[in-house]
Amino acid sequence: MSGLAGRFRELWDEIAPVGRDADSGGYLRYALTPPELRLREWFREQADLRGMPVSGDGNGNLFAWWGDPPTDGPNTDGPNTGGAVLTGSHFDSVPHGGAYDGPLGIVSAFLAVDELRAAGVTPVRPVVVAAFVEEEGARFGVPCLGSRLLTGEIDADRAAGLRDAAGVSFAEALGHRPAGADPALLGRFAAFVELHVEQGRALVDADAPVAVASAIWPHGRWRFELRGEGNHAGTTRMADRRDPMLTFAFTVLAANKEARLRGAHATVGRMSVEPNATNAIASTVTGWLDARAAEPDTLHGLVEAVQAKAAERARRDGTELTVTRESATPLVTFDGGLADRLAGLLAAPVLPTGAGHDAGVLAAHLPTAMLFVRNPTGVSHSPAEAATDDDCAAGVVALARVLEELACH
Ligand code: HGY
Ligand code: MN
Ligand code: MN
């Protein structure tokens, strides 16, 4: 194992146990809960060790600065003139998620700073490591919540009122109303480069450790609420039932079929049932559709078709359907010039992805790129997610070269 792979492993082992579920081996690192709060403390410790002052944006995002942090005053030099190069990712996970999705981008960023310093490199512009809050939306339901707040893509009052399963609001978890958009801070960044574990097998098939991202599929989340009539499982005749579970089951099958017909992706991985009793017909069933497609029109057609099939079945079952879009991310095409420049610099393949990222939000506001690190299992949002220390070291080297390219010339 190379020296850098060893240093990666050493730093990685500091956070690996945090929030890990002993039974599943997956991670329960929900935003602003004790495991994620511990990782935020670790972030500050790592920044302190490197003499990198940490600033916040009032939304729960953290920024460690190598070079001058923002002054109190607004950035009056105009957009993106601050020239800082932003990197980093997120700490939060999906329930029983993998170890690398998010934290790899933050650990790699600190190690890339170490590599540049060890090589005697001094950037002419600040290099900033970010930890964005609630990227997965696993606690408050809206993915990329922190980056959407920073960029003004979600209203601060709506974000403040988002609640978790226990009814705790984002504002209560944060300790205050989120500050919302911060154009002055955003204007200090000239580019954002997020390193992330690949959530697929393209790099395995390409036999390459690192890739550059070209695009993120448009995708979104829709909540399907079905209301029927709760009743006794034993005494209610089948012909008399208005069972929302029936409509829901049909909707899940319709989503799968419509996605296959379109070469798109549709997933229903989360649901809730009331009263959720073995011997009672459900009164309400709520399910969440995660839909994604390479093209916006395909995605729109998919969701329209699933909604129409669900509504038709609800009429047959005598149930009531309400569909609410909870989040949507348009097609993200990363800055082509930047992607090509980095792919040339790294001699790396260029890949699209169906996974959303904070980079997908920031891409609408500043030149943004992503680096992917090979995942030998290709599995993600699961304890089976993996990356080798050597490939992670290759990711650090690649990120260090990119940061030097962007911040030192
Ligand atoms: O859901 C996603 O695509 C990302 O992993 N948050
Ligand atoms: Mn994820
Ligand atoms: Mn992620």
Image (cartoon, rainbow, N blue to C red):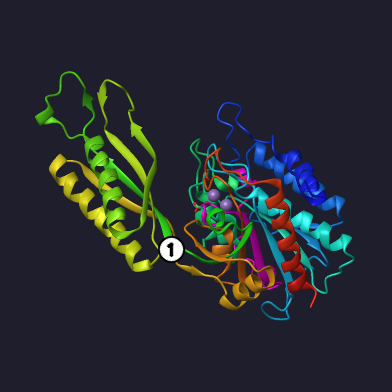
Q: Is residue 174 magenta?
A: yes
Q: Is residue 73 visible?
A: no
Q: Residue at x 27, y 42 (%)?
A: 226
252 part of magenta stretch: no
* Disc 1 crowd, CA 10 A, few/some/many (<14, 14-19, 20+): many
Q: Measured from the top left, where is residue 195 in percent x and y?
A: 65, 58
Q: Which residue is mark 1?
A: 218
In this view, 371 is above or below 280: below
Q: Nearer the viewer, residue 41 or 405?
A: 405
* Amino acid type, callout 1: Pro
Residue 193 vertical placement versus 383 (above, below):
below
Magenta region: which residues? 173-202
Q: Nearer the viewer, residue 92 or 349?
A: 349
Q: Secondary structure at mark 1?
A: loop
- What x and y, as percent, mark residue 43? 75, 48
Would residue 191 be visible to someone looking at this image?
A: yes
Q: Locate residue 332, reporting x and y percent.
A: 49, 68
* Residue occupying image coordinates x 52% and y 61%: 155
Image location (x, y in percent) of residue 256 = 30, 48
Image quadrant where residue 347 sits: bottom right
Q: Find the residue positioned furthest to the left.
A: 239
Q: Is residue 207 left or right of residue 68?
A: left
Name of the residue lying farthest toward the top: 234
Left or right: 201 in relation to 66: left
Task: Tell me where residue 396 sits by quadrant.
Answer: bottom right
329 to 227, vertically: above or below: below
